[in-house]
Image (tube, rainbow, N blue to C red):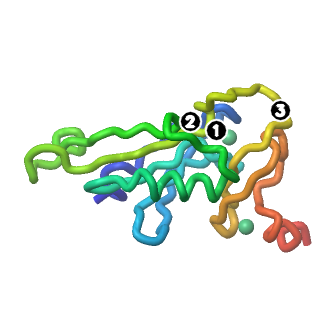
């Protein structure tokens, strides 16, 4: 259902003007969606569920970003059936916990700041400088250069 209803496009935020696209990731028991632009910059990471596992989501984010995630960086929203364009069931049907990369307490415009990217080849997460033009994680880079 998430795939059908939420497959929206946004624009890359805090990096470039390209559209960012939703990719759904299977992450243990959590349903995770990641919005990334064609260069792989991650604008938004969303955890969907009937109930959201905030602790699990934060742990997941921290594992990607080396402990740089605080509770106040994570927002929770509720989607209702009318919101998703379906009739059943009544009431809230889906919760989303989301984390926006550009929303940071330590907001910085430094082009050399480290940021989270999503490899366009193997779909793994990696960190590199915002100004870095690589679209691939360090593992895929040697393969792609040849
Ligand atoms: Zn971008
Ligand atoms: Zn890769």
Query: Tags 2 and 3 in contact by the CB under 8 Å rule?
Result: no
Residue on which disc 3 sits? 111
Q: Earlier in the sequence, mark 2 or mark 3?
A: 2
Residue 29 in percent (x, y) is at 40, 69
Marks 2 and 1 sit apart, C-alpha to C-alpha, by 6 Å
Tell me if 137 is positioned left or right of 97 in this view. right
- Could you tell me which residue is drawn at 84 percent across and 45 percent down? 132
- Could you tell me which residue is drawn at 12 percent across and 44 percent down? 91
**Element type at marker 2?**
strand
Q: Residues within 10 Å of mark 3 (few under 14, many from 20)?
A: few
Residue on which disc 1 sits? 18
Query: Tags 2 and 1 in contact by the CB under 8 Å rule?
Result: yes
Residue 74 in percent (x, y) is at 48, 40
Residue 97 in percent (x, y) is at 41, 45
Residue on which disc 2 sits? 11
Label 1 beta carbon less than 8 Å to ligand 1: yes
**Element type at marker 3?**
loop
Q: Is residue 2 above or below residue 112?
A: below
- Could you tell me which residue is drawn at 17 percent across and 40 percent down? 82
Q: Is residue 1 above or below residue 72?
A: below
Marks 1 and 3 sit apart, C-alpha to C-alpha, by 17 Å
Front: mark 1 or 3: 3
Q: Earlier in the sequence, mark 1 or mark 3?
A: 1
- Tag on residue 134? none
Q: Residues within 10 Å of mark 2 (few under 14, many from 20)?
A: some
Which quadrant contains ligand 2? bottom right
């Amino acid at each position: 259902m998430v795939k059908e209803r939420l497959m929206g496009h946004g624009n890359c935020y805090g990096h470039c003007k390209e559209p960012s696209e939703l990719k759904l990731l299977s992450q243990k028991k959590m349903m995770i969606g990641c919005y990334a632009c064609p260069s792989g910059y991650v604008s938004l990471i969303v955890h969907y569920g009937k109930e959201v596992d905030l602790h699990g989501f934060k742990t997941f984010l921290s594992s990607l970003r080396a402990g740089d995630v605080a509770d106040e960086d994570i927002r929770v929203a509720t989607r209702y059936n009318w919101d998703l364009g379906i009739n059943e069931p009544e009431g809230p049907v889906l919760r989303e916990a989301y984390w926006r990369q550009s929303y940071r307490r330590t907001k910085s415009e430094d082009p050399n700041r480290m940021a989270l990217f999503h490899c366009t080849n193997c779909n793994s997460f990696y960190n590199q400088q915002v100004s870095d033009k690589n679209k691939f994680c360090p593992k895929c880079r040697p393969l792609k250069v040849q």
